[in-house]
Image: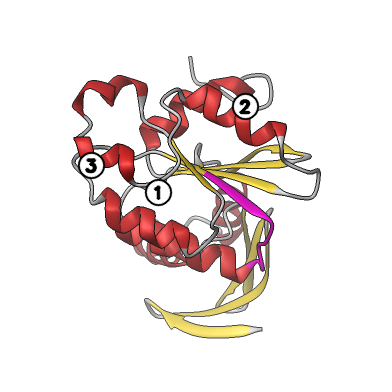
Amino acid sequence: MVMCSSHELRTEIESVSWEGQRVCFNGYPFEFTNPSPGTVHNAAVALRLLQIVFPKIPLEVFQKAFREVRNPARFEIVQRSPRVVLSGDHNPSGIACLKETLKRIDANALQIVCGFSPDKPYREMYETLKGISPQILLTQVSRLKDKMPGDYFGLGEFEPEPMRAIDRILARLAPGETLLITGSLYLCGEIRRRWRSQVEFLE
């Protein structure tokens, strides 16, 4: 059990897995579908604010609300065997948080498909991802393909079509392995349509 102090809440991390995490704030249990440390921090801030602004709302209402929160493309598992995770981390701090999340859940046997926006420090983010897994296939966001700088395509193995990149990795992925798709919310949004029957879409 890990304990820390966050925004006047005594925080205890009870369990963390691919499916999410169980956390106690001041001794009261909360469940989240996202296992990232950033989720705990954001929830702590939100809970303190909600308790200040709405002091008459029972704690059980907040517990239920946090448990039912779903964030598309935020460490979202869209397929389970083999596992496919969409994590639209699109800046260096987001990629660093992703790396910490994967460490917390002892993730291994990872293969990565990534694509970045041209206005982001894509070289820095790509290097961080190389520290997570050497099995990386670079692609691009279709709507931004005419804006990518020339040095982008030389970062590593490159497949220009995002869906084809996914097919290439899935074809060689064993049941116990994981495909991680990251680097851009635009990319995750484009690819997420492949799993339309497994995920919820807002009309």
How far apart, in angstroms, are the residues tagged by discs 2 and 1?
Answer: 21 Å
Main secondary-structure element of the magenta-colored stretch: loop
Residue range highlighted in magenta: 105-112
Q: Which residue is mark 3?
A: 151
SS for dot 2: helix
Disc 1 vs disc 3: Cβ atoms closer than 8 Å?
Answer: no
**Quadrant of the rendering where the N terminus is positioned:** bottom right
* Disc number placed over residue 198 in the picture, else none: none
| Residue 124 as seen in the image, left or right of residue 107 | left
Q: Amino acid at mark 3?
A: Asp
Provide residue 92's location: percent of width, then percent of height. Answer: 31, 58
Residue 197 drawn above or below residue 184: above
Q: Residue at x 60, y 84 (%)?
A: 2
Indicate which disc, 2 or 3, sits on the residue closer to the N terminus: 3
Res 85 quadrant in image = top right
How far apart, in angstroms, are the residues tagged by discs 1 and 3?
Answer: 21 Å
| Residue 80 as seen in the image, left or right of residue 163 | right
Residue 166 drawn above or below residue 100: above
Q: Which residue is mark 2?
A: 167
Q: Amino acid at mark 1?
A: Asp
Say how many tags the image has.
Answer: 3
Q: Residue at x 45, y 24 (%)?
A: 190
* Disc number placed over residue 89 in the picture, else none: 1
Check residue 108 for magenta coloring: yes
Check residue 109 for magenta coloring: yes
